[in-house]
Amino acid sequence: MAAGTVATVGVGWSLHSSWNENDNAGQCDMTNETWGLVRQELLKTVGKNNYVNWIEPLEFDRLEDGVATFNVTSTFVGNWVSRNFGDSILNEIAKAGEPVRRIEFTVAKTRAPARAAADATGAADAELDRMIKGTSTSAPEAPAVHAQDDDLPGADLDPRFTFDSFVVGKPNELAHAAGRRVAEGGPVTFNPLFLYGGVGLGKTHLMHAIAWELRRRKPELRVVYLSAEQFMYRFIQALRGSQMIDFKQLFRSVDVLMVDDVQFIAGKDSTQEEFFHTFNALVDQRSQIIISADRAPGEIEKMEARIVSRLQSGLVVDVHPTTYELRLGILQQKAEQFRPQFPDLRLADGVLEFLAHRITSNVRVLEGALMRLFAFGSLVGRPVDIPMTQECLVDILRQSDRKTTIDEIQRKVCDHYNIRISDLVGPKRTRIFARPRQIAMYLCKHMTQRSLPEIGRKFGGRDHTTIMHGVKKIEELKSQDSQIAEDLEMLRRALEA
Ligand code: ADP
Ligand code: MG
């Protein structure tokens, strides 16, 4: 019969994998009935999730000369079960009174043509490998890997996104510290690590940095990074192709799962459902999960309550909007980084400071602006100074001038008063919520170009007269209450920073 990969577990609890010839000609000592009883015991020891995903699909083949053999769908499944549940299985069979020394897993050949080791279900392994290794060829720590097929959306790691190139400042120091801790690959302390913040603030950079670092320190760990969108895509593909078991096994076999931009699956019910199960299974088996989103778990609309509470159960860290100091730090670093591409470029004093001051939206824009400026400077062969910067970046600078958004104002006000966005925009009328709400309305009126009805919509669908009332109230209070005047000033400065 066909050769299959066999992973074995011995009585000495030692694990090893080997290639074996499976001639399938043995007789059964242990009956399927006994295996049924053993399975019931295993359900108790490994838990329901693991049982359903790993134990139940095992097909008992035979017990011969103290060796229990099971058929599995892929090498990968065999290795996984052997690694994680081998001891338990062996134990339970022994407890049932069967003379067992070792268990083996044989890959049953079904649909695949006999193509050496590449059995059909081995595709899951290959896929996982691809996801784990990424596709990048230039990262220092990365093993060279071939580019992947377009129809296999593995998750590339950007070689530029490492801890070395991540500039730490006040707004991201907590996120950075948490990321560093997870990247050590020690015992799981907070699970999940949930990173959130506005676009272009370095969440993806940080996640890739964690992945690179883990690969370097703990190459044996299965680290998978992908976007929530890719998760959904894979899920849908698996559904269509009736490969849900493979899908589940794939995702439940990782040691570290990173899902970027999880807000994407909000409102996508079946994907959410699957994500929830994957999440729970991984938490149960103590695998590390790292999630990012553009807002806090509780603020993601159309995200199921049980998922939100799961997302909040670990460490939730906010990546704050950049400060002037951080932007300058990043610009200095990027200028160094771009330097080799523009060897003749001369950069006048004050240009980086000017950019840090004027472009406050996000790091991606900042980076793009600097790159364009350098390219322009080297093209025209003049030193890059402030007048040239103004000329070259006129569009970006103009956009940046009207940058403050209602969302930003709401977030800042909530941070300042330590309340949640949901309470800020919600119906509660108590002063601890009502006052910050009015302050936020006031700032929106004065710091954005948005109309009162537009602002009203962003405050839980309030009428424009309510907004007007709030703005008037704060105008009044500003001159009477020094605390409010001070808060307003601080918030305004923070928003302009
Ligand atoms: P997000 O995922 O939060 O939208 P990204 O991680 O994609 O943001 O970051 C956008 C760009 O800004 C990337 O090129 C990234 O390298 C850069 N960037 C963001 N924060 C930092 C930082 N603290 N240090 C260096 N580069 C940063
Ligand atoms: Mg991102």
Image: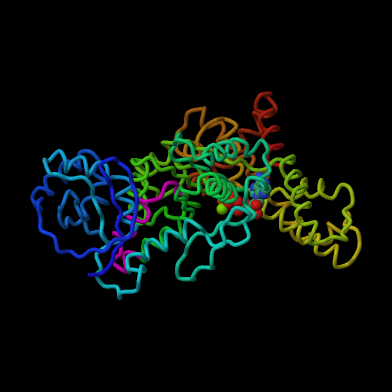
Q: Describe residue 14's horizontal placement relative to residue 344 as left or right.
A: left
Image: magenta residue range: 238-257
Residue 449 visible in the shown view: no
Residue at x-position 50% and y-position 36%? 420
Residue 113: where, in percent of width, then height? 30, 76
Looking at the figure, which quarter contains the C terminus? Answer: top right
Residue farthest to the right?
382
Q: Is residue 120 magenta?
A: no
Residue farthest to the bottom?
113
- Nearer to the camera, 142 or 389: 142
Q: How many marks?
A: 0
Q: Is residue 247 magenta?
A: yes
Residue farthest to the front?
65
Q: Describe residue 127's horizontal placement relative to residue 479 as left or right.
A: left
Q: Is residue 417 above or below residue 243?
A: above
Q: Describe residue 309's horizontal placement relative to residue 325 as left or right.
A: left
- Nearer to the camera, 397 or 145: 145
Residue 151: where, in percent of width, then height? 45, 70
Q: Describe residue 468's horizontal placement relative to residue 39 as left or right.
A: right
Residue at x-position 56% and y-position 56%? 157
Residue 305: where, in percent of width, then height? 36, 43
Q: Main secondary structure of the magenta part?
A: helix
Q: Is residue 395 above or below residue 301?
A: below
Residue 203: where, in percent of width, then height? 57, 48
Residue 19, quarter of the rendered image: bottom left
Looking at the figure, which quarter contains the N terminus? Answer: bottom left
Residue 163 visible in the shown view: yes
